[in-house]
Amino acid sequence: MDEQRGMDASFEDLLDAIEFVESGGDADAVGDNGKAIGAYQLWKIYVDDCNRILGKNKYTYGDRRDRGKSREMTRIYITHYGIDFESMARCH
């Protein structure tokens, strides 16, 4: 990341950072005694809450192992609860 880009982080950079911190990008990662799954280390309640926010059952627990779907769920969750990058990162 060049110096200028570092000064002007994007939402995609935030999602990349969350993924890196949570799993190093490993879609098969398992943590918290088997409760946190995938690249974003999502718990079942996180999936349930994303579906509640959407008002439909779009995601399954198995989708936590799909990097793209995990990223979508993380986007939904943190934009629903966060107001800026810091609060988004903290709520995740």
Image: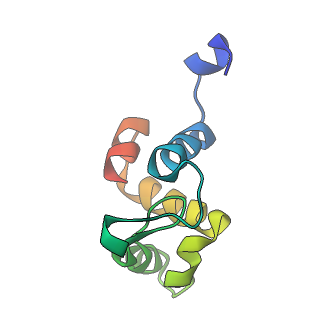
Q: Is residue 35 visible?
A: no
Task: Locate the N terminus by quadrant.
Answer: top right
Count of marks, rendered view: 0
Occupied quadrant, residue 33: bottom left
The residue furthest top is 3
Q: Is residue 31 above or below residue 90?
A: below
Instruction: Please give the name of the residue rendered at 53% of the width and 73% of the height, measured from the top-left corner.
Output: 64
Give the percent coordinates (x, y) of residue 21.
46, 44
Q: Is residue 20 above or below residue 61?
A: above
Task: Locate the C terminus by quadrant.
Answer: bottom left
Q: Is residue 11 visible?
A: yes
Query: Is 81 left, or right, of 13 in this rendering?
Result: left
Give the percent coordinates (x, y) of residue 12.
62, 42
Instruction: Please give the name of the residue rendered at 37% of the width and 74% of the height, measured from the top-left corner.
Output: 34
* Colouring style: rainbow
Give the percent coordinates (x, y) of residue 42.
43, 67
Give the percent coordinates (x, y) of residue 73.
52, 66
Viewer-nearest residue: 1 or 9: 1
Query: Is 29 left, or right, of 43 in this rendering?
Result: right
Query: Is 18 left, or right, of 49 in this rendering?
Result: right
Instruction: Please give the name of the residue rendered at 67% of the width and 64% of the height, measured from the top-left corner.
Output: 68
Occupied quadrant, residue 52: bottom left
